[in-house]
Image (spheres, rainbow, N blue to C red):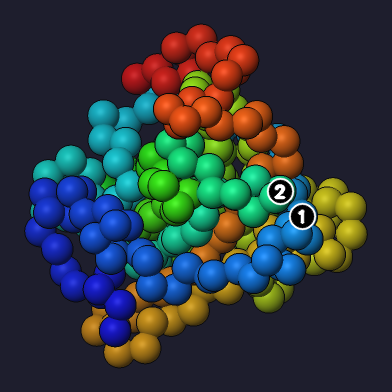
Amino acid sequence: MPSRLVRLPRRDFLRTSIRGGLTAAGLAVLSPAALAELLATPAFTEGPFYPDRLPLDTDNDLLIVNESTAQGLGDITHLTGRVLSRAGEAIRNAVVEIWQVDGNGAYLHSADRNAERDKNFQGYGRFLTDSSGAYYFRTIKPVPYPGRTPHIHFAVSQNGQRVLTTQLFVAGHPQNERDGVLRSVGDEAQRKLVMGDFRKIEGSPLDEYEAEFNLVVGRTPAEGDDGKFPGVIAKPQSRWRG
């Protein structure tokens, strides 16, 4: 079984990277022909519930807040993927952010009154991609809330500039056909690019899930040898407030 099934102490979990084997298994190796045909991931608006105050804990484990012993409620999901250019080149040192509702259907946002928020669920996390463009999050399988089908918000930034905002949806969920945001994407082929198969991990004692979502950035400035992207103007630091 993949090593991500191992229950790691909190401190060791945060130190573990993709290089350590936590998420390397399962990342697809794309053929040259497939790389030549990569389509940009459809973009969505940020929506009204990007956290208005970022939590003190912004790591990639959304199920544990700081050093708490209590865990957020929901179906544990190991979410992996890579950030790529249209040419199939790995984008390293990109900041991948995710945010989503908790198991009760509430966002980490002061204006969300849908339900009482699960204080043991972080609601937001971020991860710096490695040399292969890979990222990893431990979170919950998304749930629906009034007016929306289950989804996870994603954002990708390079040198402080947002280059992609999108959403990941649960493939085959019955509410997808009625979701206005999802239906706003041009055609079925485009909608497939933002669908994820949330599969139960065979043999997991906790009935965990895994999902893979590769993010293809439509326009990416050329990366220098130092890993930076020349000519990119950083956003104001208020984007990383809290």
Sequence-first disc among 1 and 2: 1
Binning the other alpha carbons within 10 Å of mark 1 as few (below 14), some (14 to 19) or many (20 upward) gives: some
Which label lies toward us, 1 or 2?
Answer: 2
Q: Residue at x 24, y 60 (%)?
A: 20
Q: Residue at x 71, y 48 (%)?
A: 86
x%, y% of residue 168? 61, 56
Q: Residue at x 70, y 50 (%)?
A: 87
Q: Secondary structure at mark 2?
A: loop
| Picture quadrant of residue 214 | bottom right
Direction from residue 220 to residue 120 in the image, left or right: left
Dot 1 amino acid type: Leu
Eyeballing the image, is 105 above or below 239?
below
Residue 81 at least partly seen: yes
Direction from residue 238 to residue 171 in the image, left or right: right
Dot 2 amino acid type: Arg
Extreme residue in the front direction: 225
Direction from residue 7 to residue 238 in the image, left or right: right
Q: Secondary structure at mark 1?
A: loop
Label at residue 210: none
Residue position for label 2: 86
x%, y% of residue 49? 55, 34
**Quarter of the figure that contains the C terminus:** top left
Residue 170 at least partly seen: no
> Mark 1 and 2 residues: CB-CB less than 8 Å, in contact?
yes
Binning the other alpha carbons within 10 Å of mark 2 as few (below 14), some (14 to 19) or many (20 upward) gives: some
**Quarter of the figure that contains the N terminus:** bottom left
Label 1 – label 2 distance at C-alpha: 6 Å
Q: Number of labelled discs?
A: 2
Label at residue 39: 1
- 231 vs 136, nearest the viewer: 231
Direction from residue 162 to residue 60 in the image, left or right: left
